[in-house]
Image (cartoon, rainbow, N blue to C red):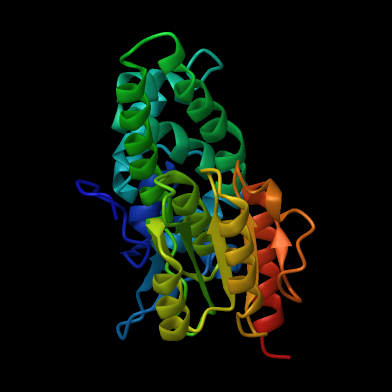
Amino acid sequence: MTAGILAANPMRLLSPRELAEALGVSESSLKRWVDAGKIQASRTDGGHRKILLSEAVRFIRETGAPIARPELLDLPEVAVAQQRGLGGTVRLLDHLLEGDVVGARGWLMSRYLAGASIAELCDGPIKDAMYRLGELWRHDEGGIFVEHRGTDVCLQALAQLRALHDPPEEAPTALGGAPDGDPYLLPSFMAATVTAAAGMRAVNLGPDTPLVAFDAAVQHHAPRLVWVSISSPLSPARVRGLIDWIEALPGSVLPIVGGQQSSPFAGAHAHASFRHVHSMAEVEAIAREVLDAAAPA
């Protein structure tokens, strides 16, 4: 996880009173929702109801419940976003241009809590904002610094979203990264965050990962899903080598390749289950497909 992030713990237990205060409702109303099965809760040995933070987040997302006191859910940046306003005049790009970590985290978290999926956030506002930042160097020598800083801000915001998900130990593993020579951090981190949100145990190998490291990781983790993110051009020989490597993966693995420089893999017959993807929405759909296939009959 990116250094300096204070993320909410999805396994934190809330009392009905704490969640009621966070949502600005009465404790009796909250308890009725629990008793009606709208919010899942466990009971202590003393019979007291306890609600996982991850369950509280699920309820908020699915019902559109407003949050009166986000800080009670360990989400103080959402309160900052609420104070600044979330109208159309406030964009993720504005926060990235300023290097505003709290603003970016609050902007993205608020939209996630309002129901947007992590894949939607990656394919929409994050992709659009990073494209704009990537064009700055054409007009300003300082553009590269702004882009790199914006990348780090996005990584911190995504890490907070990823931290809200704690798939069970028995969940199938998704694993991936970018090949050696590809320095881009964000695409593979987005794939890890999306697959974790879908319910898989995600292992992100990051950028500039040689195939020998991919091999070692596959042998160690026995993943059901492997992604390769390609944001830098590959020579024809390296494309062929990567296709050969994918072809040699176990039949139990579903390999996917995507990224802005992945077009040479379109239509490749690299593996019986191979997919060439164009969006994080596709990655999310494939992760859920793998989870469904792995579920007990």
Q: Nearer the viewer, residue 116 or 170?
A: 170
Where's the C terminus, which quadrant?
Answer: bottom right
Let me know if residue 142 appears in the view.
Answer: yes
Q: Looking at this rendering, what residue extends furthest in the top direction?
A: 139
Q: Nearer the viewer, residue 295 or 144?
A: 144
Is 113 left, or right, of 142 in this rendering? right
Q: Looking at this rendering, what residue extends furthest in the bottom direction?
A: 297
Q: Nearer the viewer, residue 117 or 272?
A: 272
Q: Using the image, determine if residue 286 lies above or below residue 1.
A: below
x and y percentages locating residue 117 in the rendered image: 59, 47
Q: Using the image, determine if residue 294 lies above or below residue 81.
A: below
Q: Nearer the viewer, residue 163 or 49?
A: 163
Numbered circles on residues, count = 0
Let me know if residue 83 appears in the view.
Answer: no
Q: Looking at this rendering, what residue extends furthest in the left direction?
A: 4
Where's the N terminus, which quadrant?
Answer: bottom left
Query: On the image, which quarter does residue 199 sit in?
Result: bottom right
Q: Residue at x 71, y 57 (%)?
A: 276
x and y percentages locating residue 280 in the rendered image: 62, 49
Q: Looking at this rendering, what residue extends furthest in the front direction?
A: 237
x and y percentages locating residue 289 in the rendered image: 71, 70
Q: Residue at x 55, y 50 (%)?
A: 230
Q: Residue at x 30, y 39 (%)?
A: 76
Is 230 left, or right, of 77 in this rendering? right
x and y percentages locating residue 57 in the rendered image: 48, 54
Q: Using the image, determine if residue 117 lies above or below residue 180.
A: above
Q: Residue at x 50, y 84 (%)?
A: 222
Is 174 left, or right, of 180 in this rendering? right
Query: On the image, which quarter does residue 33 sit in?
Result: bottom right
